[in-house]
Image: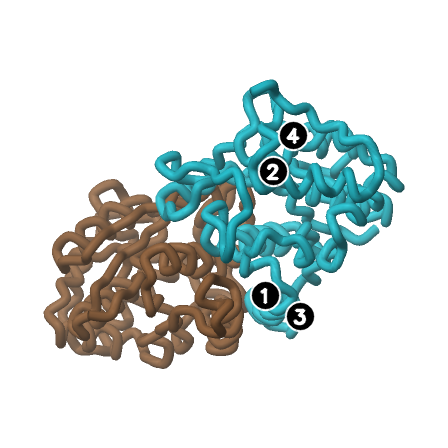
Chain colours: A cyan, B brown
C-alpha cells in the first residue's frame, strides 16, 4: 500500500483530495497547520474529516505566519473582503502553498511517503500565484533534489488531482465517493460553530460550485 | 538601498552572511526560527547579532518541527552524535532549508525584498542534501514562479555567498568585516550560557575552521 501525505485544511478541496486518495487505497497521513488563521474551525473540521475518513494519522503543525503578516487571513488588522475584485486578493497568504508543501516534504521524508497530495485548483483559483501549474512543476523539480531521496535523484510525487477541475467537478467527484461536505468548512471567517458567512470569496466560490453541480448545498450559513 | 531577508540562526555561517550583507550596504531584515531546536541559545545569539550589527528588523517565527520529528535536533529521544560517521547524519532536519527558505520567501514578498541570503555551505556541509548547489538552483526556479512577483516571471534572488567557501574562508571573511564570533553559537547542544560541548559535528567543524584559518577560537567551551 503506497503511503501519502495529504494536506488537509478542513475545506472542501482538501477533503475531496483525501476522499479520492482513500478511494485509491493509499495509506493517508493528513497534515494541517495552525497558522493563526481567522477561520480556526477549519482545524476542528480537519480533525473530524481525518477521523471519519479513516486517515492513518493526523498532525497539526504550529506555524507562526502572523509574524510575516501581509494577509487578511493572518492579520486581524486587515478585513476579509466580501467581493471578488481584480488581481491577487488580500486573502492571499504570501508563499503559503510553498510553505505548506515544504513542511509536507519534511513529513514525507520522515514517513518515507511516496506521494504528497494537495488540493490546488487552477481553474477558479481566486488569483493566487501558487495555485498555477507552473508553480507545481517547479516545486516538484525542487523536491526532487531537496531531500535524502533527492540525493538519489527523486523526491515524493506532488499530486494535484483537482488542478484542472471546476468547483462543480470537485463536488461531483467527492459525492461519487460519498464525501459528506457538511463536515467541511470553507468560509474565511466561519464562527465557532463552523457556520459560514456566505459572503467572502471562499463562500462565494463554494456556493456557486454547488449550484453548478446541481446538488443541494449542505453548508451551514449563519444568520446575519 | 536594496532590501534583503537574511536567515540568521545565531551560528557562525549565518552571522557571517549578515555581516557581509551589511557591509554591502543592504537593508537587512533578519529571520530566525523557534523550531523546537535543542540549541535554543541560538535564538538568544541571533537576537544579539541582529542588534549589534544594526539589522533593520529581526523576527522569530514559531515553527513546530517537533511534530514532524526525525532528527536529533528536534526529537529529544534521539541523541546528538559526537563523531562524524558516514552518510546523512541524524542531525539533518528533514527539508529544513526548504522550509526556512519558503518562510523567507513569504517574508520577502511582504517586505518587497529583492534578495534572500542564506549561509548554505557545500564544501564542509556535513552531508545535508539541501546544502547542495543543485538544491539552491531548483529553489530559485521555484521562487521565480511562486509569488506575486512570480506572476511577472521573477522572484527574489536566493543569495548563497558562502556556498563554495571552506569554514576557514568563512571565518576570514567575517573577521575582515570585524565580525565578533564570540557572539555566535554553533554547538548542537550548547548550554543556557551559550557554552559549547566541543564534541558534536558542528563544534568539530567550527573548531577545525579556526585552526585552519590560523586565528584564535573565541568559542566558550563548557568544562565536561
> In whole angstroms, how far apart are the C-alphas of marks 2 and 3?
25 Å
Which residue is denoted by mark 1 in the rendering? Answer: A135
At label 4, counting other C-alpha atoms closer than 10 Å, the crowd grade (few under 14, some 14-19, many 20 or more) is many
Quadrant assignment for the C terminus of chain A: top right
Residue under mark 4: which chain is it in?
A: A
SS at mark 2? strand
SS at mark 3? loop
> In whole angstroms, how far apart are the C-alphas of marks 4 and 2?
13 Å
At label 3, counting other C-alpha atoms closer than 10 Å, the crowd grade (few under 14, some 14-19, many 20 or more) is some
Which mark is drawn over residue A45?
4
SS at mark 4? helix
Residue under mark 2: which chain is it in?
A: A
Q: Return the residue nearer the eye: B100 or A48.
A: A48
Answer whether labels 1 and 3 touch (C-beta < 8 Å): no
Residue B103, above or below A220: below
Q: Residue at x 19, y 56 (%)?
A: B56
Apparent side of residue A4 relative to residue B115 in the rendered image (left or right): right
Rendered location of residue B202, percent (x, y): 35, 61
> In whole angstroms, how far apart are the C-alphas of marks 1 and 4?
28 Å
Q: Is there one chain holding both mark 3 and mark 4?
A: yes
Apparent side of residue B16 relative to residue B159 in the rendered image (left or right): left
Rendered location of residue B221, percent (x, y): 21, 53
Which mark is drawn over residue A59?
2
Amino acid at each position: 500500500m503506497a503511503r501519502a501525505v495529504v494536506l488537509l485544511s478542513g475545506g472542501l478541496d482538501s477533503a475531496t483530495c483525501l476522499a479520492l486518495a482513500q478511494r485509491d487505497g493509499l495509506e493517508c497521513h493528513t497534515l494541517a497547520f495552525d497558522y493563526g488563521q481567522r477561520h480556526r474551525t477549519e482545524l476542528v473540521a480537519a480533525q473530524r474529516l481525518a477521523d471519519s475518513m479513516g486517515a492513518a494519522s493526523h498532525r497539526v503543525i504550529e506555524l507562526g505566519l502572523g509574524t510575516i503578516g501581509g494577509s487578511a487571513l493572518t492579520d486581524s488588522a486587515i478585513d476579509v473582503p466580501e467581493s471578488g475584485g481584480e488581481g491577487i486578493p488580500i486573502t492571499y497568504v504570501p508563499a503559503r502553498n510553498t510553505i505548506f508543501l515544504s513542511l509536507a516534504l519534511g513529513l514525507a521524508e520522515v514517513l518515507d511517503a511516496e506521494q504528497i497530495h494537495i488540493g490546488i485548483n487552477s481553474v477558479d483559483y481566486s488569483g493566487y500565484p501558487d495555485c498555477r501549474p507552473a508553480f507545481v512543476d517547479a516545486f516538484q523539480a525542487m523536491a526532487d533534489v531537496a531531500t535524502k531521496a533527492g540525493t538519489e535523484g527523486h523526491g515524493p510525487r506532488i499530486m494535484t488531482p483537482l488542478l484542472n477541475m471546476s468547483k462543480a467537478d470537485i463536488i461531483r467527484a467527492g459525492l461519487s465517493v460519498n464525501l459528506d461536505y457538511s463536515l467541511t468548512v470553507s468560509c474565511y471567517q466561519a464562527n465557532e460553530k463552523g457556520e459560514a458567512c456566505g459572503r467572502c470569496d471562499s463562500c462565494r466560490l463554494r456556493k456557486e460550485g454547488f449550484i453548478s453541480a446541481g446538488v443541494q448545498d449542505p453548508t451551514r450559513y449563519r444568520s446575519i
